[in-house]
Amino acid sequence: MGEAKKLLSIDERGRITLPSDARDGIDTFVYEQDEDGVIKLIPQKTVALKDAELISNLKEAIKEVKTGKTKPVPKAWME
């Protein structure tokens, strides 16, 4: 990435505060640690269960379109 590295300190409770630009608009992070000890924080966004269901349905619909498993929409439905 070529970005400048920043030194982060761990407080007495074991917490690290990320700079605001690293967490702007991010709800949560997935934590991964490689075999060599490198820690990765992967930004995540959380969504409501209802929204997650909608996203899942949209992904399924896109998959069906790509595989040709769709039928034309009746013209009456489009009015």
Image (cartoon, rainbow, N blue to C red):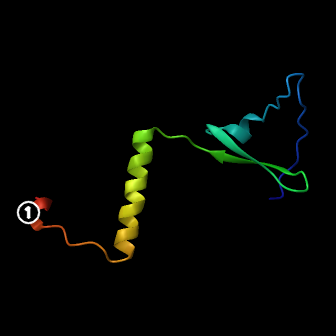
Residue in view at x 38 percent, y 57 percent: 58
In which quarter of the view is residue 46 placed? top right
Residue 33 % position (x, y):
82, 50
Quarter holding the N terminus? bottom right
Residue 64 % position (x, y):
35, 70
Q: Which residue is mark 1?
A: 76
Say which of 45 and 69 sits in front: 69
In the displayed orientation, state which residue is furthest to the bottom: 68
Residue 62 placement, left or right of 72: right
Residue in view at x 39 percent, y 62 percent: 60
Q: Circle 1 sits in a helix, a strand or a loop, which is it? A: helix
Q: Is residue 34 above or below residue 46?
A: below
Residue 29 % position (x, y):
68, 42
Q: Is residue 9 above or below residue 38?
A: above
In the displayed orientation, state which residue is furthest to the front: 35
In which quarter of the view is residue 8 placed? top right
Residue 32 placement, left or right of 25: right
The three-letter code of the residue at mark 1 reads Ala
In which quarter of the view is residue 44 placed? top right
Residue 57 placement, left or right of 41: left
Quarter holding the C terminus? bottom left
Disc 1 crowd rating (10 Å Cα; few below 14, some 14-19, many 20+) is: few
Residue 78 placement, left or right of 8: left
Mark count: 1
In the displayed orientation, state which residue is furthest to the left: 76
Q: Is residue 10 above or below residue 74?
A: above
Residue 5 % position (x, y):
88, 47
Residue in view at x 67 percent, y 46 percent: 43
